[in-house]
Image (cartoon, rainbow, N blue to C red):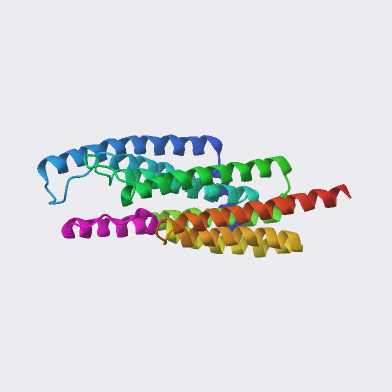
Amino acid sequence: MNKLLGKFLNTYDALSIPKRLHFFEVAILKVSILSFVAHIVFIYVENTFNFIGSSSHSYLKAIYTPFSFILYYEVFLLVIIIPKSISEFIGKQFEIIALITLRSFFHDIADINFSDIATLDNPNFINIFYDLGASVVMLFSTLIYNKMYKKHGVGDAHVELEQFIKIKKVLSVIMCGVLVLLSFISLFSWLMDVRLAFQLKTPFPNPNTVFYTDFFTIMIFVDVLLLIISFIYQFSFNLIFRNASFIITTILIRMSLSMAKPMNYLIIIIGLTFSIVTYFIYSKMSFEKSDE
């Protein structure tokens, strides 16, 4: 058992080396550039020769592809920081859902036919306004949360316990494996749906409903597991309520990925606001208690 635990810990230490993370980041950026160029070439060939028999595609759709790889790297970082503070872990989830929202803009802008006269009731224009408005609100909420976390520095006193850190490192390595497996399964499923869309000449499936819905479903159980394990090392009503609010936010994020606009953004903003308010109250009460 100790030998297996040692392998997990060594694997995590190898994955979390700054130089290795930087190498992976550079690799992702290179893949993003290549995918961007490849997507542009594909759109040109398709629009010119129409070899698949689909309608004309906007070159703006190519922006969506490299942004997806960058977003995937952020998801990888989320898994890597599991052994750190739970508060920091939740903050990274905020950043990811904000980036997913911003990525939706690149997806929606490509559906607009600029040769048509724009009207205020155009559904495509309305979706863009939803994307931009929600992105700004989520960015503001994320910055507020991160500022609160760094300023107050309260949080996870129990994460200093070596045993709990080891448990979270093991969980992080397991989640890396799950992330890779889920990526291949989701990619295969999405390609099959794309193939069907080409044949039926229907809109492409939304990638968010293929990978991120499953990923955030798994993250809900990860959050719950971390919450339960943390009780072994520190147990208090305030801590339970704060961590439970984080789980609620993750659940709301997962729900939003299956909803239509603008309800999905409303659900996300409610979840972020709930976590921020809860964390603020927890931080304030913790400092007042420490002052006493």
Q: List x then y, in percent, for residue 31.
A: 35, 38
Location of the N terminus by quadrant is bottom right
Give me the residue at 62% from left, 47% from top. 88
Q: Is residue 154 rendered to the left or right of residue 12?
A: right
Give me the residue at 38% from left, 44% from top. 105
**Residue placed furthest toward the front:** 120
**Residue placed furthest toward the right:** 292
Q: List x then y, in percent, for residue 130.
A: 42, 49
Give me the residue at 21% from left, 44% from top. 57
Dominant secondary structure of the residues highlighted in magenta in the image: helix
Between 139 and 31, the one lying in front of the other is 139
Q: Please say whether residue 112 is visible from this viewpoint.
A: yes
Between 288 and 77, the one lying in front of the other is 288
Q: List x then y, in percent, for residue 250.
A: 55, 58
Q: Please say whether residue 234 is visible from this viewpoint.
A: no
- Residues drawn in magenta: 184-211
255 in relation to 45, above or below:
below
Between 39 and 283, the one lying in front of the other is 283
Give me the residue at 42% from left, 41% from top. 70
Q: Quadrant of residue 233?
A: bottom right
Residue 187 magenta-drawn?
yes
Q: Quadrant of residue 193?
A: bottom left
Q: Is residue 144 rendered to the left or right of residue 66?
A: right
40 in relation to 55, above or below:
above
Q: List x then y, in percent, for residue 224.
A: 60, 64
